[in-house]
Image: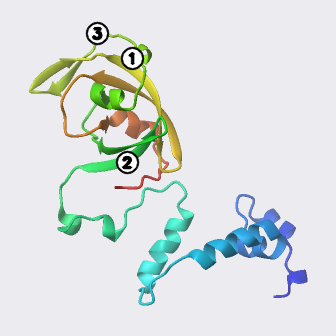
Amino acid sequence: MKVQDYSIVEQLRKTLGQISLLSLLIHSDEHRRALMKILNEAHIPDKISVNHLEKIDNKLFEVNGVTFSEDELPMEGTQHNRALYLTVKCKDSMVTRVLVDNGSSANIFPLSTLNKLKVDDERIHKNSICVRGFEGGGKDSVGDIVLELAIGPVEFTMDFQVLDVAISYNLLLGRPWIHATGPHTNRTCRIK
């Protein structure tokens, strides 16, 4: 196909929501440079299988997809039943060991994590909520706080219950966060 035979305007009329990579390469110097940079810097192993290459290709187009790679699995592979931990960005700091718990009816922010992030205590709104399930019973909340988290490229404004507890994770994302992602949307989370 010759360049003059290919019309980006014609393609846009046919597919309103998408522009092909070929169109960008042909008609936009800026996009061509960016795409060529991506292609030139992509490192693909010499002995990659077609299936693995297709998985990589699919990940490029899953802007809002939750993805896991083989190297992120523990030694026992997919048969493990370990907890799911994420790394998130909060207040320009990376927070590791963020537990995703679909059994929790609250997002929990331990007071110790809040203090490490140097979040002002005045942002905590006092409440009289008792969170059940800690230490075999209930734990009174210090209060609630609204914070912004970046998980992958997606930002969330979330309500958290602040608890003064000693736990093995730095933050717990429960059903409120899971539901906030939307029923039919996927979110990109890089598992650490």
Between label 3 and label 2, give the one nearer the viewer: 2
Label 3 crowding class (10 Å Cα cut-off): few <14, some 14-19, many 20+?
few
Q: Quadrant of the N terminus?
A: bottom right
Task: Report how far apart the C-alphas of labels 2 and 1 lie in the structure.
Answer: 23 Å
N-term-proximal mark, 2 vs 1: 2
Residue at image position (29%, 16%) is 142
Q: Which of 122 and 67 is in front in this view?
A: 122
Q: What element carries label 2?
A: strand
Residue 154 percent location from the top left of the image: 52, 45
Q: Are marks 3 and 1 in contact (CB under 8 Å)?
A: no
Residue 87 numbered mark, or none: 2
Residue 42 numbered mark, or none: none
Residue furthest out toward the right: 4
Task: Report how far apart the C-alphas of labels 3 and 1 lie in the structure.
Answer: 17 Å
Q: In this view, does 9 lie to the left or right of 191?
A: right
Q: Are marks 2 and 1 in contact (CB under 8 Å)?
A: no
Q: In this view, does 167 lie above or below 129?
A: below
Residue furthest out toward the left: 136
Q: How many labels does the image show?
A: 3
Give the residue at mark 1: 121
Residue 128 numbered mark, or none: 3
Task: Report how far apart the C-alphas of labels 3 and 2 lie in the structure.
Answer: 30 Å
